[in-house]
Image (cartoon, coloured by chain):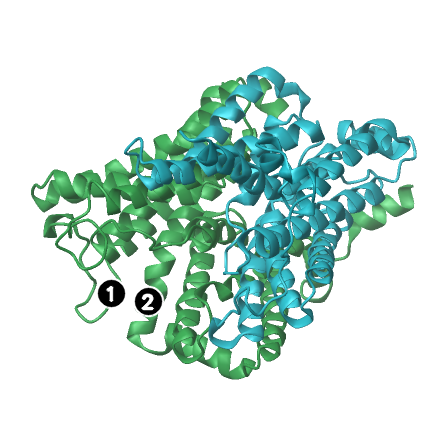
Chain colours: A cyan, B green
Amino acid sequence: MDLNLFISLLVRTISLGTPIALVGLGEGFSQKAGPLNLGIIGYLSLGAYVSWVMAYRLQNPWIATIMAMLAAGLLAAFVAFLVVTLNLSQIVVGVGVAFFAEGLVCLLTFIAWPNYLIPTSFNVGVFRTAGIPILREIPFIGEVLFGHHLFVYLMVGIAFLLHYIVNKTKFGLKLRAVGESTAASDAMGINVARIRYIVIIVSGMLCGLAASYMTLVRARAYVLGITGGVGFLALAAIVLGAWKSPRIVLAALLFGFVRSLHFLGQAQRWINIPSEVWQMLPYIVAIIVLMISSIRIGAEAPPELARTYIREDEA
Amino acid sequence: MGRKLLSELISTLIIIIIVMIAASLLFMLAGINPIEAIRLIIYGALGRTRGISESLIRAIPITLIGLSVTIAFRAGLWNVGGQGQFYAGAIGASFIALFFPMTRIIHLPLLFIAAFITGGIYAGIAGFLRAYMRVNEILSTLMLNFITLWLTQYLATGPWSDPGRIIVATAFFPDSARLNRLHDTVRVHQGLYLALLCVGIVFVILNYTVYGQKLKVLGANLTAAKYAKINIKKKIVTIFLLSGGFAGLAGAVEVSGVYYCLRNGAFPIEAGYGFIGIGAALMGMLTPVGTLISAVFFGILIAGSSYLKTVVDLHGHTVNFIIGLLIIGMVARHLFRPKIQKFLDKVLFGKKELTERGTSSGS
């Protein structure tokens, strides 16, 4: 394998792994306090649509990204209302919101561009510049690590920030307590509902950022269903990363690598493996990963994961 | 009991009305006249014999996957892999249909048995992982969905494909492996009887067998299940096998009743029957008969909106926002259903609320 191909494989690993990492970081943060959001699939679709339509209308990718984060955060806040305030099942609401958002995005796309004549990057204010000026000139290392968009480095920053918040701050202590035992934290006077609202909304906003990265940075295009698969792989990355932010990033990069093998397999044709096998490979890896993780760290999942908490005075 | 059912029906109706109002508002936003849209949906789904047939065609697989979901969710197992098991069943059925030609009377049953087994074993993987390795079944079933999706595409475009066909697909099944249409002019097929039969079977299993009783105990309370001497691990695996089997049958009726071949891209995963089946089961209160009714309702909705598509060029998945709202509405219904029941007690049945008065004076 020649060096250029190897470099582009690693570059792809990072650019495909970044959205998985962003979703995984937010959702992992949320799961640490209990809530499981299957709605991330919906937040991603909505975020992708909003980022593209705003970048088209305003011709400014930065504002578009912020709008995408706000829209996805708003949808997440609606989910938080359903699962925290109304105590509805997180799994059922998650499936419902994923459906709702997908249909809604189809309708909104139709409203924005009748007959789905979606504008291409030529007419949309996508992100153009990429890379860190001097560092990206370094041979190999620079080409692999420093030629990316700012969002990639932002993702790494977010990973460490979340890790710090969870492990070193008072808020993080409360958050972990809620994920360990909701009833006990409630008895200690921790505002369980407030913490869960915050983590669910953060998870939604990071989905918005991930979606914006996918449309405005990586693909520089928008089609319906562009975010497919990322949400599911992020869920697996969280388990592999054992709910710890830096490890979630590494897990996401592993999935990014497996996905970029598809590209390599086609470019090289060194093995006659059909495209479909490359497509299903990340999910096979995910299942193997789930098996290995369960043997190794099965007990580390937050005990309150996906459980609805109903206070005794309400029950 | 009758009052409970009545309050369930009324609260379901309220949710449907609220969702329809919300849907109308969104249609208005898109510049589509909501009354016209609803008229077209109803006409497309129920207006002609053909419409009714199209609605039923969609209701058949949704019912079967809904039954699969009902079994698993009743046991407290979140099998959200109906889509993957659907494809597994379709692959199993196609294998028998294409490579083992024989007389119809053996071929068709064998095809369905194969689909039940492949769907069941595929779900059984998740069941085994859950029972013996503590792998979260939500995650494993979600991942398994994608593997059979791509496997179907691989088989239909690669080794099993028939180069003589215009679209990329396998050869047509022989007549012995096809479900007959109920009438020459409509597409609805004998799979309808199979779906009804399965509703009956699951109803009996859940309500009149020891197995069904144990399944419900497992769903209600794990500790109680242990005390009732239920072998939980084995039970989890068998429940997944059974649950996946019905989802596999859904795949079989699609290939042998509608398409007569295994083909690629017929059902995109995000909007596939697998997830709509979850909605139908939840809307049907996790009961077989309720699931059937909801599946017919969703069938009408989907068939109607694909008719709408011929008039307004909306993407086929647009209807999902209505389905999503209904799914959320169905769980939200439990918030106000007891109040409706109390209201009914007072107004219709004139019963005084003895229990509540008793507790309030006691405390």
Crowding near pointer 1: few (<14 within 10 Å), some, many (20+)? some
Sequence-earlier tag: 2 or 1: 2
Where does residue A23 sit, x and y in percent of width and height? 64, 42
Residue at screen point 50% across, 60% down: A224
Q: Chain of mark 2?
A: B
Residue B111 is left or right of residue A19, and the answer is left
Can residue A165 be seen?
Answer: yes
Q: Which residue is mark 1?
A: B187
Residue nearer the viewer, B328 or B144: B144
- Type of amino acid at the residue the image marks with label 2: Glu
Q: Which mark is residue A227?
A: none
Q: Which residue is mark 2?
A: B54
How many numbered discs sit on the rendered protein?
2
- Where's the C terminus of chain B, which quadrant? top right
- Type of amino acid at the residue the image marks with label 1: Arg
Can residue B230 be seen?
Answer: no
Q: Chain of mark 1?
A: B
Asked if the residue under mark 1 is in contact with the one under mark 2, i.e. CB atoms within 8 Å, the reply is yes
Residue A34 is left or right of residue B26, and the answer is right
A120 to A178, vertically: above or below:
below
